Image (cartoon, grey):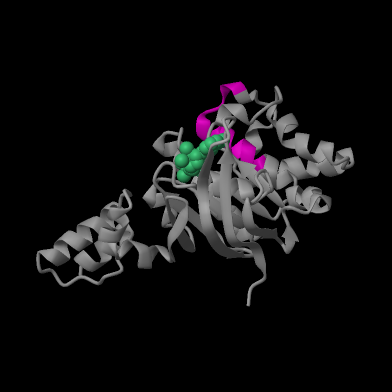
Amino acid sequence: MTEKFFELDHVTHVYQSSDGEGHEALHGVTLSIGTGEFVAVLGANGSGKSTLARHLNALLLPTEGRCLVRGWDTKDETRRWDIRQEVSMVFQNPDNQLIAAVVADDVAFGPENLGIPPAEIRRRVKDALALVGMEHYAQAAPHFLSGGQKQRIAIAGAIAMQTHALVLDEPTAMLDPRGRVEVLHAVEKLHEEQRMTIVYITHFMEEAIAADRIVLMDVGQIVMDATPHEIFSQPERVRALRLDVPLAADLAARLRCGGMDLPQDIVTDEELLHCLSR
Ligand code: ADP
Ligand code: MG
């Protein structure tokens, strides 16, 4: 049994507006994510993905139910600092996340606030930049970087904090295809080499395939929770939730409909090519 990193037990979240009206954004969400797992979260706009993400480092607290991070209850104020040391967040807009005038200072910002000695900070900054493939940009001005590079710097900042989990809320939504690939590769590397626990919210199906597991949300609830192959072998269900299906899975389903004998679980281009070339 892997240790549980995140554990949500019937979490409901109600946003309270100033006129006293409540809006329920999460409804009875129960979810367990193991240490070292890479989980993608998919769902249409407004399905509650960001609200869920913000529960994972106690930016939001459950209205009902319980959210545990490494066994600590997010409602326990004495543990809030510990939780923030364990879970970093990366958001959608690369321009809102970098604050310093020089890349290295930006990555050093978090550890500096923790009072870590300068030599140790320099080492961490160097290692973190190398991990995201940005070691040659330590002295660059973030202003001149591409969106994909900026997001990788934001990720390096999280690595330098030595948190064990990274929650990314649509980190590639504002990037071009090349930037998207760069960010996804950096995340995969953290997962594989550092065994970081990853929660990756995206609306790009091709990115979700990289995860061990996909959690699919609809109107504040989890409606599917399975491997990418299990999810995308049911294209009708995925489409009914107003989501796309990866191109290869879609094409395979059409070819099967047309009478071709193809396996159910084709998801990636490589798998489809392999089957077709037989
Ligand atoms: P997603 O990230 O999947 O698009 P969100 O978690 O942002 O979904 O939003 C879920 C629901 O909660 C939506 O209906 C949204 O309008 C609502 N919502 C989000 N933030 C707030 C807020 N601060 N106040 C009130 N309602 C909100
Ligand atoms: Mg969102």
Nearest to the observer: residue 121 or residue 16: 16
Residue 215 x, y percent position in the rendering: 46, 59
Residue 247 x, y percent position in the rendering: 27, 52
Q: Which residues are magenta?
A: 143-156
Q: Is residue 214 visible?
A: yes
Q: Residue furthest front?
A: 20
Identity of the residue drawn at 51% across and 35% down: 148
Q: Is residue 223 left or right of residue 10?
A: left
Vertical placement of residue 2 versus 157, above or below: below
Q: Is residue 171 visible?
A: no
Nearest to the observer: residue 26 or residue 255: 26
Q: Quadrant of residue 255?
A: bottom left
Picture quarter with the C terminus: bottom left
The number of numbered discs placed on residues in the rendered structure image is 0
Residue 15 x, y percent position in the rendering: 57, 41
Q: Residue furthest left?
A: 258
Residue 117 x, y percent position in the rendering: 89, 41
Nearest to the observer: residue 22 or residue 181: 22
Residue 153 magenta: yes
Identity of the residue drawn at 49% across and 47% down: 48
Vertical placement of residue 97 versus 122, above or below: above
Tell me the chief SS of the magenta region.
helix
Picture quarter with the N terminus: bottom right
Identity of the residue drawn at 57% across and 22% down: 144
Q: Quadrant of residue 36?
A: bottom right
Residue 83 magenta: no
Q: Is residue 69 left or right of residue 272?
A: right
Q: Quadrant of residue 235?
A: bottom left
Vertical placement of residue 101 versus 226, above or below: above
Identity of the residue drawn at 44% across and 42% down: 46
